[in-house]
Image (cartoon, grey):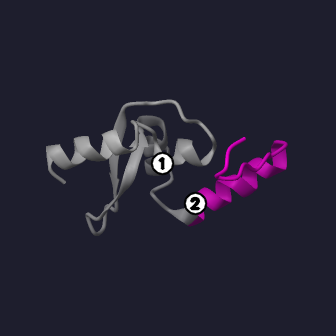
Amino acid sequence: MTVEQREATIKSRQSRCDICVLIGDMTPVMLCQDHDKATGQNRGMLCSRHNLGLGHFNHSPNELLAAVEYMKQYCQLQLVSAGGR
């Protein structure tokens, strides 16, 4: 992705993280380009918190789902749809 393409993508997304939007947070933030480490394929634009979070779980859906199951044991989990809070 070129610098121009990245800037256009950020502008079109109004500087909003793809994961934040899914949980109803529409706050503009600084964005990082997320990509598949194995293929180099661009996936989306994330805030640094979510980008680092995925990295801490080795970009593994299985590890993330295991963490969700763990948290469900100790927290009152309130699932949020993509439509907002």
Residue 53 x %, y %: 49, 44
Q: Quick one: label 1, few (<14), some, or many (20+) residues within 10 Å?
A: some
Is residue 79 highlighted in magenta?
A: yes
Is 11 left, or right, of 58 in this rendering? Answer: left
Q: Nearer the viewer, residue 55 or 77?
A: 77
Q: Amino acid at mark 2?
A: Glu
16 relative to 65, above or below: above
As helix, strand or loop, the secondary structure at mark 2 comes to: helix
Q: Residue at x 19, y 54 (%)?
A: 1
Q: Amino acid at mark 1?
A: Asp
Q: Nearer the viewer, residue 70 or 85?
A: 85
Q: Quick one: label 2, few (<14), some, or many (20+) residues within 10 Å?
A: some
Q: How many marks?
A: 2
Residue 12 x %, y %: 35, 44
Q: Disc 2 versus disc 1: distance between alpha carbons?
A: 20 Å
Q: Quadrant of residue 68?
A: bottom right
Q: Quadrant of residue 29?
A: top left
Is 23 left, or right, of 85 in this rendering? Answer: left
Q: Which mark is residue 47?
A: none
As helix, strand or loop, the secondary structure at mark 1 comes to: helix
Q: Residue at x 80, y 46 (%)?
A: 77
Instruction: Please identify, in this view, whether the residue under mark 2 or under mark 1 is nearer the observer.
Output: 1
Q: Which residue is mark 2?
A: 63
Is 49 left, or right, of 45 in this rendering? Answer: right
- Magenta range is 62-85
Q: Which residue is mark 1?
A: 18
Q: Earlier in the sequence, mark 2 or mark 1?
A: 1
